[in-house]
Structure formats: C-alpha cells, structure tokens
Amino acid sequence: MEFAFTEEQRIFRDSFKAFVAKELAPIAQEYDHRGEFPRHIFRKLGELGELGLMFPAEYGGGNGDAIMTLIMFEEMSYASPAIAVGIYVHAALAMIAIDSFGTPEQKQKYLVPGIKGEKIGAWGFAEPNAGSDPGSMTTRAKKTADGHYIINGTKMFISNGSFADFVVLTAFTDPTKGMKGLSLFIVDKGSPGFSVAQKLRTMGMKANDTTELVFEDCQVPAFALLGEENEFNNIMRTLTFGRIVASAICVGLARGAFDHTLRYAKERIAFGQPIGKFQGIQWMLADAATQIDAARLLTYQAGWLYQQGLPHIREACMAKLFASETATKVANTAVQIHGGYGLMMDYPIQMYYRDCKLLEIGEGTSQIQRNTIARQLGL
C-alpha cells in the first residue's frame, strides 16, 4: 500500500500552501471578525485553476484527482475553516453535482464559469425542520403542463446563499416515493419567487455566508432539472464525496490549531521553563498529533477509494466521524493549553474552537455517521 503523495501531488501541495500563506492566512482573522466572506478568493482560485481540479479539461477543468482536491481543502482550512467551507459548497457539492449529472448545456452554463470563479454556487439541502432526515423535507417542485416546474419551500443554513449566482437544491417531485422522490434542480439568482430571507448569525464559521432561502411559486424551466426526476441516489453520491472533502477540512482545522499550540508550548515560559517541557502538556500534544494523523489517513484512504471507483460509503462516514470529532478535541486542547490567551479574539485559537462544532453537524451529524457505518457492517 502506497502512503506517499505522487510527485505531481507534492508539487501541488507545496504550491497551494504558498498560496494559502500569501492570500488566506493574512485575512482569515479579519473576515472572521467582520462576519463576511472574501468573495475575491473565488476569482483568485479560478485564475489558478484550483476550482476545476477534478473537472474535465473540455470545460476548463484540470483533469486532476480527488487526492489533490483533498489537499486543497485541507490546506485552506489550515488557515480559515470558514473560507474553506464556502469554497467547498461551491466546488465540491454544487459543481460536483452538475459535473456528475448535468447535460452538456448545463455544464456550459454553470460549470465553465464556476471553474473560473465567475459564477458562484450554493447547495440547498437542509431545511428548517429537515437535515439528517431528508424524508421530512417540505420543498416541492411541481411540473406544469408546459414543462416548467414551480418550486415552493425554504432552505436553511445555506452557505454562499446571499451572493451565490445559482443554487443546486433538493425538492420532492414525487412525495409518495419517500426519499426516492427527491430531485435536484439548479435555480438562478433573480428567479421570480426566489429570495434570501435572512443572513443567519452563527457561533462559529463567521466568515462563511450562512443564510435562509425562500422559494415561493418560483418558476424554473425544465432545463433546471439536474439529472432525472426522483434520483435520490444522485444526491447521496454527491453527499458521500462531500463527506470526504469535509473530513479534509476537519483535518486542516485540527492541524492549524495544533501547530499554533505546539509553537506556543515551546515559547510560553512557566515555572522557569517552556510549558512544553511539562509531561501534562506533552501528553495532550502527543494525543492530538496521533488523532490528527489517524484522521488524515482515514480521509485520504476514503479519497483514494473514491478515486479508484471502489466502494467507499463506510470509509467516507468513518473519516467524517473521526476527523470531525478529532477537530473538536484538538481545538479544545489548543484553547486549554493557551489558557487565558486561548479566549482572546486577537488569537486565532478561538476561531478554530468556534468553527469546529459545525463540522460535527454539517454533512451528517456524528450520530448519523455511526448509523450509516453500522448499516454498512450489516447491522
């Protein structure tokens, strides 16, 4: 079994690390305090070709692989988990769905400008009363006699919602089929009946634009249907890969919190020596380092299986479960070791601490991951 990156992947990682250090790290705290997403990052990533890593060259993509995508999101999250989540929703959910299930015409309209960062996508899945239980969704898309669809419903906790140019959303086309009656639609910003109800105030991920979207008799053309009607499996395939990418975001967050804390432990003097010389601190950091490496291996194993076209649902859920809980544990350890400074808004540790909890909830809670793993074990 090969545990090393390829030469191409190593070169990409080093190059992208330099981009993050120059473009993201210096602004992460500023945008966190402002509660605003730096939209110019989409353009910068588009110019570098990073938004299209996994997509076909015929649409402007890089014909890259899943591992490079995981590297990109891990490194972004190292500096700013919230910015990484905004890019993730666009590139690893909305555009992945369009690339996987869209027509050539849909790909030309959305994928091509999306890869360039000229159009920004959002992913409309969760609702006020439905997240982990998609069967409880109330958004409906009713087909009219002339072939259009009328969409009614509300989507909640939607990243990029206030500025996205389009939203890939789930809606029931046949509620009698249960979850299998869900379909995907692409809805353009400015469509009649589509509005941003509010921007939501969150505990963490403050640089991530989180919104509530409302669809009231929103009429869209037949062209808006992504894939076929009642293709719930398409939604789950998108979400399964999304969980692997979310795991990489968790690993990046944990690494960022850990590296700040390791430096602090070497520099902070107490009782005449660096606090890292005390066994209590050493054990905390040793545990954190071990957990991060284990989470990283689970994440890249799941990514490798996905890339090879092998079964990966269990591994994706294991990675998401362990990596998200590791991120929370490491962020908690980081605050504890920093002491009072860990609570100060001028230190980045508090940002990691506030940001980590979303990752145990979004893309399937830890409890949902455990349920899915158990089913995959035949229980």
Image: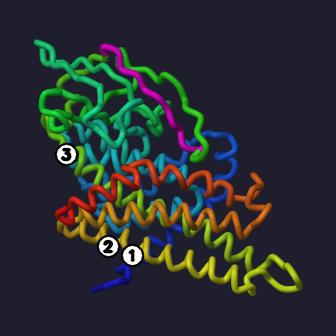
Distance from Cα at disc 3 to Cα at disc 1: 27 Å
Q: Which residue is drawn at 31% across and 62% down?
A: 316
Distance from Cα at disc 2 to Cα at disc 3: 22 Å
Q: Where is residue 116 in the image (x, y as percent from the top left)?
A: 40, 47
Distance from Cα at disc 1 to Cα at disc 2: 6 Å
Residue picked out by circle 2: 301
Which label's residue is closer to the chain start, 2 or 3?
A: 3
Q: In the rendering, which numbered label is found on residue 297?
A: 1
Q: Please tell me whether mark 2 sits on a helix, a strand or a loop.
A: helix
Q: Where is residue 197 in the image (x, y as percent from the top left)?
A: 49, 22
- The amino acid on which the numbered mark 1 sits, given as a three-letter code, is Leu
- Judge from the rendering whether residue 236 lies leftward or rightward of residue 251; answer left or right: left
Segment tinted magenta in the rendering: 206-217
Q: Where is residue 21 in the image (x, y as percent from the top left)?
A: 61, 64
Query: Pointer 1: residues within 10 angstroms few (<14), some, or many (20+)?
Result: some
Is residue 130 covered in magenta? no
The residue closer to the viewer here, 371 or 250, is 371
Q: Please tell me whether mark 3 sits on a helix, a strand or a loop.
A: helix
333 relative to 108, above or below? below
Q: In the rendering, which numbered label is found on residue 234?
A: 3
Quarter location, residue 300: bottom left
- The amino acid on which the numbered mark 3 sits, given as a three-letter code, is Asn
Q: Position of residue 161 (x, y in %)?
A: 46, 33
Q: Which residue is drawn at 61% across and 51% down?
A: 354
Tell me whether circle 1 and circle 2 mark residues in contact (CB < 8 Å). yes
Quarter location, residue 348: bottom right
- Judge from the rendering whether residue 283 lies leftward or rightward of residue 251; answer left or right: right
Q: In the rendering, which numbered label is found on residue 38?
A: none
